[in-house]
Image: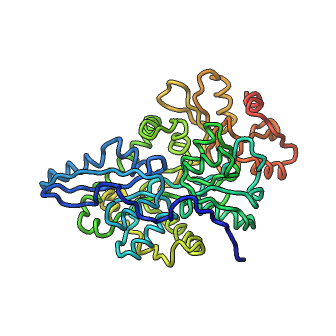
Amino acid sequence: MPRKTLVLLATTAVLLPLTGCGGGAEADGGSTVTVTVGYQSKTINTVTAGTLLRSLGYFERELRALGERDGKKYEVVWQDYATGAPITAQMTAGKIDIGSMGDFPLLINAARGKQLNRPTKLVSVTGYNLRGALNTVVTGPDSTLVSLKDLAGKKVSTSVGSAADGTLVRALRRAGIDDVRKLNQQPAVGASALSSGSADALSQFVAWPGLLAFQGKAKALYDGAELNLPTFHGVTAREDFAGRRPKVLEAFLKAQIDATAYLRERPVAASEKVAAATGLPPEVVHLYNGPNGIATFDPTLKPRLIAALKEDVPVLKSAKLVGDVDVDAFVDDSYLKRAYGSAYGKQLTAAAPAARSEVWLKSADRTESFATPEEALRHVAAHRDRVRVAYVPDATTGTLWYADKAVWLADGNRPVPFLTQAAATAYRSAHAGARPLTYAQALELAS
């Protein structure tokens, strides 16, 4: 069935090359090699190839070791962007060597690289969610919109060509909605549009939905996990750069592997480092990056993620953002295999952890994890004055959310959390006797 979407262009074209960005791509200056890395500091499930990696200095450490072996001096230029589109523009202009971005922008990166004779390769993954929860649609805190179908005829801000845009397109199609007025805006502009009322809803990627909800400026309308389609962010490298400097790319991937290990082993410290570097609240970073967070960090190129990438191609083609994309030719795990060594096969088959609740107490350098939301609420009730933040997974999708921002129901004597009102309503229709609760009532019921 044909669909129509009215696009209001509120920003420049998706892939318009930037000018005056400064810096250049990998180049020799005598014995000095400069490597330019494009990243998105506030897209916090890319931190193992961006914000956290940069703050830890692991890439620079690997390059120093490489320089001791080959006699060259290596310098890293980090360039921060709000979305993946300008990173692709700079890569195809030969000004960025390595970049990280979401699954939809990765496909655009592949298409544009081939079109402009500057081919790129997908060389690793940063964070993923197998159900699609990295993207969320939110509305204003006092909005009367309660389900996706309420968006018919409304204005929704998103970044066209982004992973969040892909979630919006798919969700609207499933709901049979074809008259949404889409505003093509950068995430920060969209957040302002939502606050001012010039947009009725905002579809964005991490960490914007979680940030706005934490600040009390938004509430979740649609959980991307309802699509049950994997979403992820990954690392792309220019093919010519990788061919000339394979050891540099391997050094980057070794550094990413170590940054991933740091995040897993010291999750609170990692969240605080990312928060310090980005200005985001640590509680928001931890929602996505914590041990039970929405994102699972694993650099390996898992077959299920690559299969999902192939399913994304028709969506981008229908929006006329790409033509045919040869995903198999785009994916190249050879560099990552060399960086991992014999451990790659085992990591490739590693599964994402099961959803659990989590409580972070004030002044604590670790969090407490719980098998059920009820146990987490009991812990909150016992430490009311010391709780920094509590997280609980949606009862149907497993998506982690703030306990005090969740929609709560009582099913018998059991408190049950949901990310959205629509999910809670659907649960009530299938569970006779389930009744609404406030957060305070949920705490009382649990304790």
Estimate the x, y position of residue 197 in percent, counting from the top left: 69, 47
The quarter of the picture where residue 168 lies is bottom right
For residue 148, above or below residue 139: below
Q: How is the image coloured?
A: rainbow
Confirm whether residue 371 shows in the render.
no
Residue placed most toward the observer, 72 or 142 = 142
Which quarter of the image is occupied by the N terminus? bottom right
Q: In the drawing, does residue 291 fall left or right of residue 24?
A: right
Residue 436 at least partly seen: yes
Q: Position of residue 11 (x, y in %)?
A: 54, 59
Tally the marks.
Answer: 0
- Residue lying at 62% horizontally and 62% vertically, measured from the top left: 8
Question: Residue 195, position in %: x, y?
Answer: 65, 44
Toward the viewer: 219 or 14? 14
What is the residue that sits farthest to the top in this orientation? 385
Residue at the spot x=74%, y=65% of the render?
177
Q: Is residue 52 above or below residue 226?
A: above
What percent of the width, then of the height, locates residue 258? 35, 47
Identify the image quadrant of the C terminus.
top right
Q: In the image, what residue occupies the spot 61% across and 37% down? A: 215
Image quarter for residue 334?
bottom left
